[in-house]
Amino acid sequence: MSYILNFDTATKNCSVSVSQDGEVIAFEELNSEGYSHGEKLHVFIENVLKQAGINFYDLSAVAVGKGPGSYTGLRIGVSAAKGICFAKDIPLISIETLDILANSNPIEEGVVVSMLDARRLEVFSAIYNHELVKIRKTEAEIIDANSFSEYLSKGKVYFVGDGAEKCKEIILHENAVFVNGKFPSANEMASLSHTKLKNKEFEDVAYFEPYYLKDFVGVKPKPRK
């Protein structure tokens, strides 16, 4: 019997679950524009462990969404995961955020484009077949009217995630389906983290860093008058 603590903080959705042998047994999340992950994450972790009736020493591993996504959110999540793993001497598992998001939208045909908003007309995206196997690597790209035309010409393309919202007015193909209200969630991490646990696909706790995908660009302070 294996218990895994799963959480993702890469978007405005702060999401935590405990899974047992690949099935979610406790879950809590908050989707907030205020990005309150620093306040909520550790509270949610305590809550789901209590719901599951276990403690840190019962865990077989901690799984964290590694990015891409919000720089601040990723730092909060990865720091918490590394801290727990180091303190309790348990393995660290990382799962790409877009893989988590894709698993929220099972399909029977076509492809899923999992995408997160990366400001302006840019998105982080990856593409998955109907079995949710990744068929195009994660990229940061600028959206235009011809984006994903190779896939749209062949069948249904399901755009999932907050990055899909900005595509509605730009990608007008009849095969484009825009799925609303989906965010990376720890509810979809259980099967992914269980597979990595079985395969012993662990990260080095000391050296693991979030997958930012592109360099951070800070906002310049306004000059004082």
Image: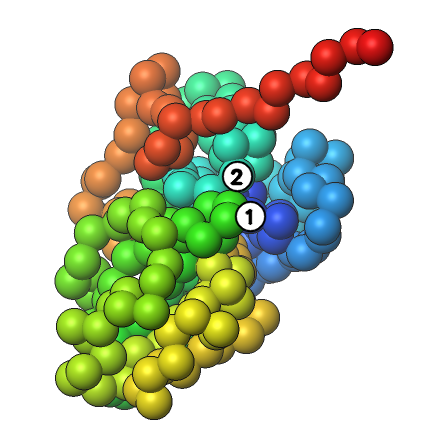
Taking 14 as reference, is 189 left or right?
left
The reply to whether the C-beta atoms of the residues labelled 2 and 1 are less than 8 Å apart is: yes
Q: Residue at x 54, y 74 (%)?
A: 180
> Dot 2 corresponds to which residue?
70
Which type of secondary structure does the marked residue at label 1 adopt?
loop
Q: Residue at x 28, y 65 (%)?
A: 147
Taking 42 as reference, is 105 left or right?
left
Residue sitting at the far top: 224
> Dot 1 corresponds to which residue?
11
Q: Residue at x 32, y 50 (%)?
A: 141
Between 142 and 32, the one lying in front of the other is 142
Residue 176 drawn at (x, y percent): 36, 81
Residue sitting at the far right: 225
Taking 189 as reference, is 148 left or right?
left
- Label total for image: 2
Between 83 and 212, the one lying in front of the other is 212
Q: Residue at x 48, y 74 (%)?
A: 168
Number of residues whose C-alpha sits closer than 10 Å to that of mark 2, classed few (under 14), some (14–19) or many (20 or more): some
Residue 214 drawn at (x, y percent): 36, 33
Rounded to the nearest whole Å, what is the CA distance between mark 2 and mark 1?
6 Å
Residue 20 drawn at (x, y percent): 44, 57
Amino acid type at circle 2 is Ser
Question: Which tag, 2 or 1, sits closer to the chain's start?
Answer: 1
Amino acid type at circle 1 is Thr
Identify whether 94 is placed above or below 149: above
Mark yes or no: residue 187 visible: no
